[in-house]
Image (cartoon, coloured by chain):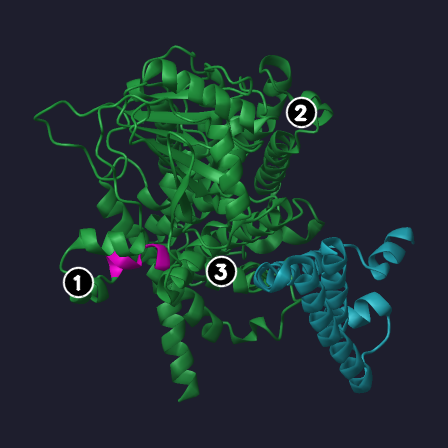
Chain colours: A green, B cyan
Amino acid sequence: MSKSFRQSQSFLHTWSGLLLGWVLFVIFMAGTIAFWREGLNRWMRPELDRIEQPYTVLGGAQRFLQGKAADAKSWYIAMPSDKSAGAQVYWQPQPEPGKERGGRRGGRRSRENQALIGADGLPAVARETRGGDFFYRFHFDLHYMPVIWARWLVGVAAMAMLVAILSGIVTHKKIFKDFFTLRRGKGQRSWLDGHNATAVLALPFHLMITYTGLVTLMAMLMPWAVVANYADTEKLYDRLFPHVEEQARSGTRAPLIDLGRVVRNAEQRLGGPAGSINVSEPGDAAATITVTGAPSAMLSSRAPSLTYRGTDGAFVWETPAPGGASVTAGAMIGLHAGRFADYGMRWLYFLCGIGGTLMVASGLVLWIVKRREKLPDPARPHFGFRLVEWLNIAVIGGFPLGVAAMLWANRLLPMAMKDRAEWEIHALFIAWGVALGIASVLRSGRAWTVLLGATGALLATIPVYNVLAAPRGLPATLLQGDYLLAGIDLALMTFGASLLATARRVATYRPAAKRPRKRVPGGGAQAPVSSSGLHAMEPAE
Amino acid sequence: MIVLCLIVAVGTFVLFGLSTNQHHQQRLGAKLTPPRKKALRSAAWGGVGLCLALAFLAEGAVYGAIFWLGALSFGAAAVFLFLNLAPTSADTSRRAK
């Protein structure tokens, strides 16, 4: 009985892991990168100085908006901090009479209605880029496809992941007993040990991140509780995200109070930093200022808001204490996104994310390794085998190449290029497409070498380019104590070196008179070169 | 306190690692006896508890619990990589010969 139960779980583990494994790899990797979203936002806009005086920038933002959009319907200012790339401001013009208002949350954010305020409080010119935000959105919205489809795909993949993790614990029952075992140079066994190690070492993280990931999509995946209780979604939103009643425009002009004063007061009341400021009807007597807490200040992702009168800064409203369910969901989403995490905790998140990415990758490779031994004719494998191998190379080798290409595009595309931000992303997919081609044309050993080597070389050389040609190279950032940017450069070099070492391993690997094969892709968490051990990770045919 | 917690986490997993037959033999050159295994294991579980206490002291109950699991994962990974990838005394003496 117990044996057949384990066998059934093993079947489930194999197929739930395989079918969506490639999607999972991409989601996992993008999510892992997105833990440095803010850092990458700065790294990808090297023109901007680090913000030392947030209130100076806030004052500058207010002056800019008063000059540019004094009569706007609303302003939005992302509260600047030493982690943010300037202060992003948006404004929504007064709706033209007779026209419907845009969406309920902020409306249109076209390019004409936004600006970036630099560290000196003046409008800054920076290269157009999506920055780290791209990886954050890509993590659940993917790209080139309607958001709703992407989220369903991601949601299904996450469910498959949860199934794979739970059935994996049953299947690989020895993971706890053989916790410290890594048999090197033993072909399939070594791959299995590696797969188990990346899984079990960060098991609490994997379970947490998969479960809370599903929680972020729960209203879409399991809408029944909402459908049964709320006929009107507006009402649900009001319950979930309470906000102050909007005041009608009075028509009487009145100057807006200094935002810095209001924000200082709000930060005292919130007991932490502010995250964003919304001003509705600025310049009117009915103006209100709403300050929302920064997500870094609390575990829950649903930060409370405070509202002040715009003319004299009197405190008028605050978010009511949320209900238990809302706090639970908010805390889970917060736990998933890790916005509360300081640098130490963020590194732990990041390393666990790398572990998860490697877990998915090694699981996919393991599928191939395990079946290669049983092939009736190794020279002519069946279609399913060839397909999986091709997808492995194209995705596990190709997506990192795409990311490297995107980072280079961020550095090299002309500043004035039309749709520059979008072309950075096209660069990712073009490089990925090339990888797909390479995977189709070359034999697997060659293809792995070329892709891993190219990715490694691209990543390792970006920091060099930064020193030579970009405003903020490694020596400069280290001298300024700007460890966020320095850390990104150092991490890129580490990843580059690891990938190059891995590529070299694959290229020089000669199993007893047979062709070279694949190897653990990506990942700075593992020591790239250990000893002769990794060699025979691929079983001899 | 955070650093101390990480150090304790690493130490904890060194003890856990040394309580496995293979690594004990390899690193300490002696066979692992059942009483010693038990002692190592209990000391390691003590380390898990100490790590939790330190994490709570450093970060409070909410973040402490998260940091505790993170620190344990970190300790486990560091020790795993070290025990499996660092050369053992047997390797070095072989190389010296």
Image: A221 above or below B25: above
Q: Where are the magenta residues, as a range?
A: A215-221
Indicate the quadrant where residue A186 lies. bottom right
User: With respect to residue B26, does A19 lie above or below?
Assistant: above
Residue A499, position in %: x, y? 58, 38
Q: Amino acid at mark 3?
A: His
Q: Nearer the viewer, residue A165 or A487?
A: A487
Quick check: A503 left or right of A63? right
Measured Cα–Cα span from mark 2 to mark 3: 33 Å
Residue corresponding to mark 1 = A227
Horizontal and vertical percent position of residue A351: 58, 50
Left or right: residue B93 versus residue A48 is: right
> Which badge, 2 or 3, comes first in the chain's sequence?
3
- Evaluate whether label 2 is on the same chain as label 3: yes
Callout 3 crowding tier (Cα within 10 Å): few <14, some 14–19, many ≥20:
many
The residue sitting at 29% across, 28% down in the picture is A281
Q: Is the residue under label 1 in contact with that under label 2 (CB below 8 Å)?
A: no
Secondary structure at numbered mark 3:
helix
- The residue carrying mark 2 is A477
Q: Which residue is most to the left?
A: A98
- Pick whichever, A455 or A312, lies toward us: A312
- At x 32%, y 41%, the residue is A142
Q: In this image, A501 relative to A35: left or right? A: right
Can residue A316 be seen? yes
Q: Earlier in the sequence, mark 3 or mark 1?
A: 3
